[in-house]
Image (cartoon, grey):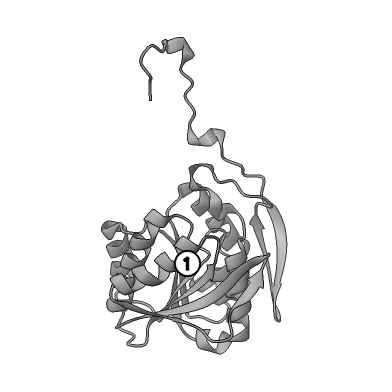
Amino acid sequence: MVREGEDDDDIVCLDESFFVNDDYQLTRFAYGSQVLELYCLQSASTDFDLTGQLVWPGAELMNDYLSKHYEMLRGCSVIELGSGVGITGILCSRFCSKVVLTDHNDEVLKILKRNIELHQSSQESHCLATEKLEWGNSEQLNNILQKHPEGFDLVLGADICFQQSSIPLLFNTVGKLLRRSQCKTCKFILAYVSRAKVMDNLVVSEASQQGLHINEVAGTRTVVKNLGGVIYEVTSR
C-alpha cells in the first residue's frame, strides 16, 4: 500500500520469501511405544501464516491421546486438517489404511511432503497422501472428495484454532466432511489448547451453529507446555 505523499524511493516491498525460515532440524518424538523422526523448526515463524513449520502443544496432546487409543485407528481412513509438519498424520499411518494430510500454505506443504519422503522406506508410507486445503474452499474440498468418494472414518485437527475468523470456516469444512462420509460413525477429533477465553467459547458455539454436536472426551483435560488442553469429539446431529 502506498500512502499519499510517499515517493517511489521511499517504498519498501517485502514478499513472503523475506520471512521464510527453512532451518529445519531432524527431531525425535516418542509417544508411548511409537518413535517418530521428522524435520521441523524449533521456534515459531508466524509471518505469512507459517505456524505449521513446528510441532505445537496440541499436536503433542493429540499424539499422546492417539497412542493410548491406537485401536480406534486400525484400518481407518483419516483426513487431517492443518497437518503442519505431519507429526499426527505420520503417527496415524502406522495403524490406518489411508491418511490424507492437508494444509493451505504452500511453504508448509513443502516440509510436509519432505517428512513423508523421509518415511518412504517404511511400511506406513504407502498410505500417506498430501492435499492443499484452505478451509471454506469448496473447490479444493470437492477435489479431495472426488479422489476419495467414500469419505473418511476420522477427521483430525491438532492445535488449529488460532484465529477467530477461521473457526466458522473450520467447522463448515468439518461439517461437509462428516456429512459426505459413507461411514455413519465418522467423527472429528480436535486436540484443543486454550489460549483465550473468547476462543474457548467460540469453538463450542460455532460447532453448534454449524449443526454439529461437540463433546469433551472425559479424562482428557490436561496441561501441555503450561497451557490447558482437551480433546473434543465432534459429530453430525
Categorize mark 1 by other alpha carbons within 10 Å: few (<14), some (14-19), many (20+).
some
Q: Is residue 129 above or below residue 53?
A: below
Q: Amino acid at mark 1?
A: Asp
Mark 1 residue element: helix
- Residue 167 is situated, as x and y percent measured from the top left of the image, at 39, 61
Say if residue 61 shows up in the picture.
yes
Q: Residue at x 47, y 10 (%)?
A: 9
Residue annotated with mark 1? 200
- Residue 220 is situated, as x and y percent measured from the top left of the image, at 58, 81
Please tell me which residue lies in front, 228 or 16.
228
Please tell me which residue lies in front, 198 or 31.
198
Q: Quadrant of residue 205?
A: bottom left
Q: Residue at x 43, y 67 (%)?
A: 201
Say if residue 122 shows up in the picture.
no
Report the label total. Answer: 1
Is residue 104 left or right of 51 when viewed as pictured? left
Is residue 15 left or right of 43 when viewed as pictured? left
| Image quadrant in which the C terminus is located | bottom left
Q: Is residue 155 above or below residue 23?
A: below
Q: Quadrant of residue 77?
A: bottom left
Residue extending furthest toward the front: 197
Q: Residue at x 56, y 37 (%)?
A: 19
Please tell me which residue lies in front, 97 or 192.
192
- Residue 173 is situated, as x and y percent measured from the top left of the image, at 33, 66
| Image quadrant in which the N terminus is located | top left
Q: Residue at x 28, y 76 (%)?
A: 211
